[in-house]
Each structure stands twice: as structure tokens, then as C-alpha cells.
Image (cartoon, rainbow, N blue to C red):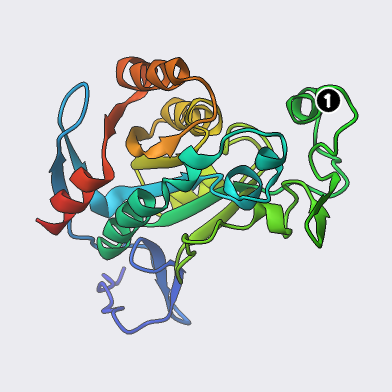
Amino acid sequence: MTIATIPDSADWPTLGVAGRNTYRVSDQVVDMRRPPREPRPVRLSALPQDVVVDLSRAAMVIIDMQNDFCGAEGWIASLGIDFAGGRALVEPISRAATAMRDAGAPVIWLNWGVRPDRANLSPGTQHPFNPNGRGPGLAGPRQAGAREYGVLQHGEWGAELIPGLERHEGDIWVDKHRISGFHDTPLDAILRNHDVTTVLFAGVNADHCVLGTLMDANFHGYDTIMLEDCVATTSPEFCMQATLHNVRFCFGFTTTSQELAEAAAR
């Protein structure tokens, strides 16, 4: 039996996520060795304890920073609900996202983007958005000035990012249709394909979709960190305090965008 040598596959075509989860391939050989990645450890001041995070295996998930929740003409604003807390997140979210991109970490935008036919939306999912059955509800038609669109519907204005936030080249977009962004979406597969073990969370509402997705991430085995200055809610203040307590007590840690940016720069 001839002992085959290990090929030098550095210049071969690649399949997969560049720099993270790839094969190198030729006509005769598939090199299944994953590319080496240099660790990028940072220490973050956090609660209930400081944490050391490897940014080379981290991702940031930004939840529901879209017009219908945070826009002046959005669905939430039309209900007379104060959306200023969400609007105030533009600067800290941008700061944290920039730090993550500079570290080579994935930035994932996770937004409501429901089917126009509501074919996968149970009554229990639809009810909070249309409790008396007389509103537009999810994907229902709504007039905003001269604009008519479907509420939180995929591809429409209500599901777009608010002004001031920008999806950069290389960022990843995931539509969801439940409080948790893991249910019936590719989020888990995307994180695992990018070899992510730690997920940092931002967005609205802290006590609804952010917490629900963070909890599911914890249940899936990810390390979870909430960026507390990058989350807001339209709920009463005690809901925010309970959310921060529950994250710190049961599901992970909290820190800030400033702490992340300064640690990444160091």
C-alpha cells in the first residue's frame, strides 16, 4: 500500500464560509481541514462577572430595528406607543457593530418579515398584533402617509432598517416570524456554519424578541451576552429591570457597547 502525502492545498478552490468553515477541493482530493483562525480574546467588564470572549468565534445579533417598531410612521407609532427608546439605540448599536466587523465577527440583522399569506402564522402568534381582530395585524395592509404596505411583511417598508442603521457588505439578514429568532429560521445553522460560540444581542424589545431569542440561544448551547445600552423596550421600566436580572441570573451576562468597543480596540 502506497503512503499518500498530504497535499499543499493552499491555492485550491474553496467551498464554504471563507476563513471559517471550508473545504479545499481539486479533481482528485477534498481537503477537509478547516482553516486555522487566530483567537481574538478580549476581557469585558460585565455582570454578574467579567467575561473573556474570543471575538473570532463571536457574532452580534441585532433584533427588530425596523420601521414598524422604531419609525415615526411605523405601526407601533400609529398605536400611540412611545418608540423613542428604540430610536435612541442607533448610536450604540452602530458602535458595537463596527467593533464586531473590525474584529472579523459576523453581524446578523434579525427582523420580523412575515409571509403575505400568513400561511405559517398560528392564531396565537397573530393575536398580540391584532387582539380584537379589527386591526391590520401581521402582513395586513396599512397606510402610512402616501405609503401602503403590509405590517412587518417581508420585503416591505415596515420590515426595513430604520434610518441611521445600515446593513454593510458581509452582514447577514434573517427574517423571523415568531418572538424567538430561532424558531423555523436558518439562524442556528448560520451561527454554526460560522463556527460561532458566543452571541451578543441588541435591539427591541428587550423583554420580548431580544430575550426570547437570547434564551433560545442559551438553550442551543451558545454563550449569550446582552448589550444593555443596545436594547430598549416599550414595556414599563420594571420589565427592563426584570429582563436584565433574568439574563444575569439564568441565561448569560450583560455588558455595554462602549466596553465592547474599547476592549476590541485594545
Picture quadrant of residue 182: top right
As drawn, 9 above or below 86: below
Asked if residue 186 shows in the view, the reply is no
| Observer-nearest of 120 and 11 | 120
Q: Which residue is mark 1?
A: 123
Q: Please identify the quadrant where the N terminus is shown.
A: bottom left
| Observer-nearest of 43 and 160 | 160
| Observer-nearest of 92 and 27 | 92
> Could you say where residue 205 lies in the image, as x and y percent from the top left?
52, 33
Mark 1, Cα crowd under 10 Å, few <14 / some 14-19 / many 20+, is few
Picture quadrant of residue 238: top left
Q: Residue type at mark 1?
A: Pro
Q: Residue at image x 25%, y 74%?
A: 5
Q: Secondary structure at mark 1?
A: helix
| Observer-nearest of 213 and 221 | 213
> Could you say where residue 133 lies in the image, as x and y percent from the top left?
89, 27
Q: Please identify the quadrant where the C terminus is shown.
A: bottom left
Picture quadrant of residue 178: top right
Asked if residue 216 shows in the view, the reply is yes
Q: Residue at image x 49%, y 33%?
A: 210
Image check: 263 left or right of 71?
left
As drawn, 110 above or below 129: below
